[in-house]
Image: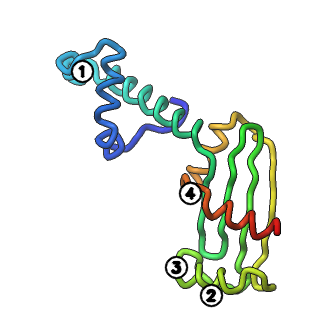
């Protein structure tokens, strides 16, 4: 398995896709039920293959990621060959970016000495999708990129 198995809730949300996947493997419902009963290890392998296919599609299409922690916001732009980052750090320890008030504080103090902004970029050390998956495992979430683009626009002007 290249990534990680989807959670039960994710399989349920992707029910139709899973049925289509099984059909592409010439497995109908009766045969799937039989595999689960008689060959659970094969069923596990099928679930793993399906999970990897889903992850591969999601990661290939990933363009922006965000990771919020108490005093940091990490914004990532995942390009083909490299990843760019904008890191915002609150220098006041009571600020919590996980709270609405923390984000309001950031909006009010973005151009003061209370906020550090770091820009970075680097080429992927491993295969692109594996690097993005590692960021997701560390807590990053897929994003529409609005915050990255907004911050990048502010910084560039």
Q: CA distance from mark 2 to mark 4?
A: 22 Å
Which sits earlier in the primary sequence, circle 1 or circle 4? 1
Q: Quadrant of residue 22?
A: top left
Q: Are marks 4 and 3 in contact (CB under 8 Å)?
A: no
Q: Are marks 1 and 2 in contact (CB under 8 Å)?
A: no
Q: Nearer the viewer, residue 37 or 32?
A: 32
x and y percent of residue 65 in the render? 61, 54
Compared with 97, 37 (above or below) is above
x and y percent of residue 142 in the render? 55, 52
Q: Which residue is mark 4?
A: 139
Tell me the quarter of the image containing the C terminus: bottom right
Q: Quadrant of residue 93?
A: bottom right
Q: Secondary structure at mark 3?
A: loop
Q: Which residue is mark 3?
A: 99
Q: CA distance from mark 4 to mark 3?
A: 17 Å
**Residue at 36% from the left image edge and 16% from the top image edge:** 24
Q: Secondary structure at mark 1?
A: helix
Q: CA distance from mark 2 to mark 3?
A: 11 Å
Which sits earlier in the primary sequence, circle 1 or circle 2? 1
Compared with 146, 42 (above or below) is above
Compared with 15, 76 (above or below) is below
Which sits earlier in the primary sequence, circle 2 or circle 3? 2
Q: Which residue is mark 2?
A: 94
Q: CA distance from mark 1 to mark 4?
A: 34 Å
Q: Which residue is mark 1?
A: 32
Q: Nearer the viewer, residue 156 or 110?
A: 156
Q: CA distance from mark 3 to mark 1?
A: 46 Å
x and y percent of residue 36 in the render? 24, 24
Which sits earlier in the primary sequence, circle 2 or circle 4? 2
Q: In this figure, which colouring scheme has been used for the structure? A: rainbow
Q: Secondary structure at mark 4?
A: loop
């Amino acid at each position: 398995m290249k990534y990680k198995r989807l959670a039960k809730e994710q399989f349920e949300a992707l029910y139709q896709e899973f049925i289509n996947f099984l059909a592409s493997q010439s497995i109908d419902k009766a045969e799937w039920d039989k595999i689960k009963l008689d060959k659970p290890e094969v069923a596990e392998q099928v679930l793993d293959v399906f999970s990897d296919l889903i992850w591969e599609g999601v990661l290939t299409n990933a363009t922006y990621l965000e990771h919020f922690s108490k005093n940091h916001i990490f914004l990532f732009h995942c390009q083909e060959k490299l990843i760019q980052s904008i890191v915002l750090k609150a220098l006041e320890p009571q600020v919590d970016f996980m709270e609405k008030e923390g984000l309001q504080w950031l909006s009010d103090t973005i151009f003061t000495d209370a906020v550090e902004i770091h820009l970075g970029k680097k080429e992927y050390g491993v295969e692109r999708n594996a690097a993005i998956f590692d960021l997701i495992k560390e807590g990053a979430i897929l994003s529409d990129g609005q915050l990255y683009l907004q911050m990048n626009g502010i910084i560039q002007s």
